[in-house]
Amino acid sequence: MTKKINFTIAFLFIMVFCTIMGKTVAAAATPADVKLVINNEQVTADVMPFIQNDRTLVPARAVFEALGGTVNWDQSNYIVTIEYDGVIVILKINDTVATVNGRNKTLDVPATIKNGRTMIPVRFVAEELGFLVGWINSTRTVTITSSEKTDVRPVITGYVTEVSVEEGTSNKENTIVTVQMSEPLKAPEDYSTMNLTSPDRFVLDVKNFLVDSKVSGLTYDQKDSPLTAVRVSAYNENAVRIVCDLKEATTPTVSLSADGKTLTISFRTLSTYFNPMDDGKLVVMLDPGHGESTAGKRSPDGTLKEYEFNRTVANKMKNILEAQGIEVLLTVNDDSDPSLANRCESANNSDADIFVSIHANAFGNGKEWTTPKGWEIYHYQGSVLGNRLAAAISSSNFPEIGILNRGIKTGNLYVIKNTYIPAVLIEHGFFTNIEEVELLKSDEWRDKAAQYNAEGIMNFLNSYIE
Ligand SMILES: [Zn+2]
């Protein structure tokens, strides 16, 4: 079942009062008008821009005073003079010859008068004065941007035209927020995300976009969804900020459509409603860290390579879990060392319900034995399910595993941050500690570690199965 709730509201014909450089003008916008964006801010003037012979004409005074220029009107000679940063442009009404610092230039369309306002061809004048002029065709918007020599402002690309939310059909996509844009994002870097806490929020910023006046926020009320509301605002002069208010910290999947015009934010089911059996199977992804040729990652005496320990324990866990009917996937099946991004991609593109990364620890320069020792487990900060998985694995390991418990820790480690399922990373002891490395090399100890890890995983999964 998919419910689509559209939260845009009808555009209302309204009287708008806007302030341009300290001047207040009463203005009426009509839908047929050309919109006007000056230095990334949408502005309204009493006579709005219009198009004539493919050229956009704008009100001289409203536009160029807003940009910091000076505009003089010579009523007796029908001449308008615009000055900015040492450049003087002079236009005469109904005359296709203009002068720029005294030199004659020919216009396609002359300046004209409409409703008592002097309307001038914007591209010609603005570019002569050193401004950047853009055109957003879908929304009929002309953009004019100051370009300062040391700090060129980004030019607005388009509008966020719609924000909606719908109920998804799986654990991984419980709630889907869709952000629609009038134009494609120019580059993937034009959007960014972050998590905020107290209260928990997820933030998506879309750079170089404005928010359409029709777009409003929305609330969402589904008991198994982490989402409670979406707010949309102009974050600063050149970014739209979409804030998702959450019941708990969670990192959703964000994807950009092939045409670059739709951003999709997919939230997983609220942790208390986490259901790993929703697709009829339990799937665990194990991630044995590093590879045979990864630099360092070996004991000072060279008798233990971390990758070999990681793979052996992961394979032992795989056998134990599979014997219990659990499907096990590995991020790597040979001695190679896939990138961390590849490892996360494997998880994010799979049916896996949880992700467990297998490692052993190191301290010092790697050439000498050092004293730090013990077992520890990491989950991503704020991940409710990551914390529960870490707690389950930790409690099945201790005290049986027989080494120091350094505890449950939170961290920004890449693989636990960038996987969208509950994820942990286990550091099984230090191969730079002369005593602990002997445990790490021992097959019996590896069997124990694999057994306790598998039990912890099964305890965690069982707690979510009816
Ligand atoms: Zn490692």
Image (tube, rainbow, N blue to C red):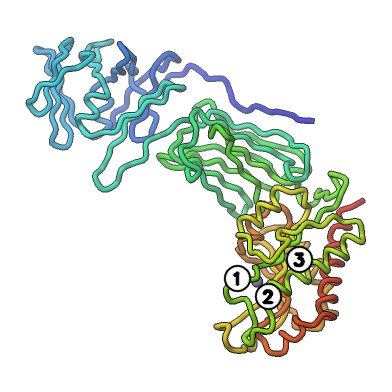
Q: Which residue is mark 3?
A: 390
Residue 441 coordinates in the image, percent (x, y): 76, 82
Specify whether residue 408 is in view. Answer: no
For label 1, the residue is 294
Could you say which quadrant of the image residue 373 lies in? bottom right
Q: In the figure, 429 relative to 389: above or below? A: below
Q: Earlier in the sequence, mark 1 or mark 2?
A: 1
Query: Is label 2 within 8 A of ligand 1 (CB to nearest ligand atom)?
Result: yes
The answer to whether residue 285 is seen in the rendering is yes
Label 1 residue SS: loop
* Image coordinates for residue 11, horizontal then vertical, percent: 53, 20
Task: Using the numbered discs, state the Cα–Cα distance from disc 3 to disc 2 in whole angstroms.
Answer: 21 Å
Quadrant of the rendering where the N terminus is positioned: top right
Ligand 1 lies in which image quarter? bottom right
Q: Decide: is 290 above or below 61.
A: below
- Helix, strand, or loop for circle 3? helix
- Residue 327 in picture, x, y percent from top left: 84, 55
Tell me which numbered mark, 3 or 1, is placed earlier along the sequence.
Answer: 1
Inspect the image, locate mark 1, and give the three-letter code of the amino acid beneath it: Thr
At label 2, counting other C-alpha atoms closer than 10 Å, the crowd grade (few under 14, some 14-19, many 20 or more) is: many
Give the residue type at disc 3: Ala
Above or below, comparing residue 5 to residue 98 in the picture: below
371 vs 110: above or below:
below
Q: Nearer the viewer, mark 3 or mark 2?
A: 2
Say which residue appears at 72% left-offset and 53% top-offset.
Answer: 421
**As drawn, is 260 to the left or to the right of 454?**
left
- Name the residue that disc number 2 marks: 306
The mark nearer the N terminus, 3 or 2, is 2
